[in-house]
Image: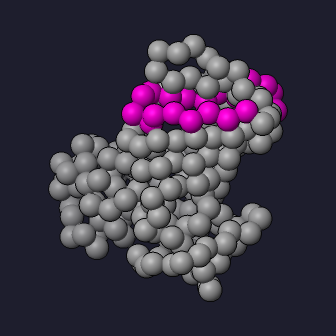
Amino acid sequence: MFGGGPEDKPRDGIDAPTSRFDIGTRLKALRVAANLSLSALAKASGVSKSNISKIENGLISPTFEMMEKISHGLGVPASVLLSRGNPGQIGISLTKNGQGIELDDPQYQFEFLFSDLQNRRMVPFVTTVTSHGTSSRAPAAHKGEEFFYVLSGAVDFMSGENERIAMGPGDAVYFDSNKPHLVVNRTSEQSRLLWVWLE
């Protein structure tokens, strides 16, 4: 599940050092700022009140599909849900090595880059795939377009009706996020991907 921790303010357009990102606290702050009850957000997003409450209390980790639905219910881009601070227009952003915000789930570890840019359309991140040949989750779909580039390791990529596509370092794929997709690690070692989601 996503870890909690204090949110450090970025300075001079540069992200604060890496910290565990408490997406539950972030979600609750956005919901309260929008003057929405749990029930109202559940109705607006199509995500159950129980699941929203569990995310806010750190009991479950939201999938990208859930984050997209919740952000739609809040009336903000998903990038706002995955950012620190208040909306603002920043002309340039720099994320130095190890200074992204980190989120985990049982299958992936994410480092989201440029978290000070809430008005961005792209959500770039580095993903470490920790599953070993199997997955506890089914392929999921959400709006947008994506690509990822394999930095290290070996993964299988599944999208739509296609069989698993074996990918290694230097391989890249671009795909429609509206089709169910999933990435599974093929080895006992962790694999790292540079990933970009265009909302």
| Residue 26 shows in the view | no
Give the mark count.
Answer: 0
Residue drawn at x 66%, y 72% is: 94
Residue drawn at x 73%, y 33% is: 171
Query: In terms of depth relative to the viewer, which is nearer, 53 or 182?
Result: 182
Instruction: Give residue 119's quadrant in the image.
Output: bottom left
From what the image shows, is residue 39 above or below residue 128?
Answer: below
In the image, taking residue 34 as reference, residue 55 lies left or right, namely: right
From what the image shows, is residue 127 above or below residue 75?
Answer: above
Query: In terms of depth relative to the viewer, which is nearer, 47 or 4?
Result: 47
In the image, taking residue 59 as reference, residue 174 lies left or right, namely: right
The image's colouring method is one colour
Residue drawn at x 43%, y 79% is: 88
Asked whether 169 falls inside the magenta stretch, the response is no
Residue drawn at x 62%, y 46% is: 195
- Residue 138 at x, y percent in the picture: 48, 25
From what the image shows, is residue 30 above or below residue 103?
Answer: below
Instruction: Give residue 166's quadrant in the image.
Output: top right
- Residue 56 at x, y percent in the picture: 40, 57
From what the image shows, is residue 55 above or below residue 137?
Answer: below
- Residue 183 at x, y percent in the picture: 61, 30
| Residue 187 shows in the view | yes
The magenta-colored residue range is 171-190
- Residue 79 at x, y percent in the picture: 45, 60
Q: Residue furthest bottom?
A: 12
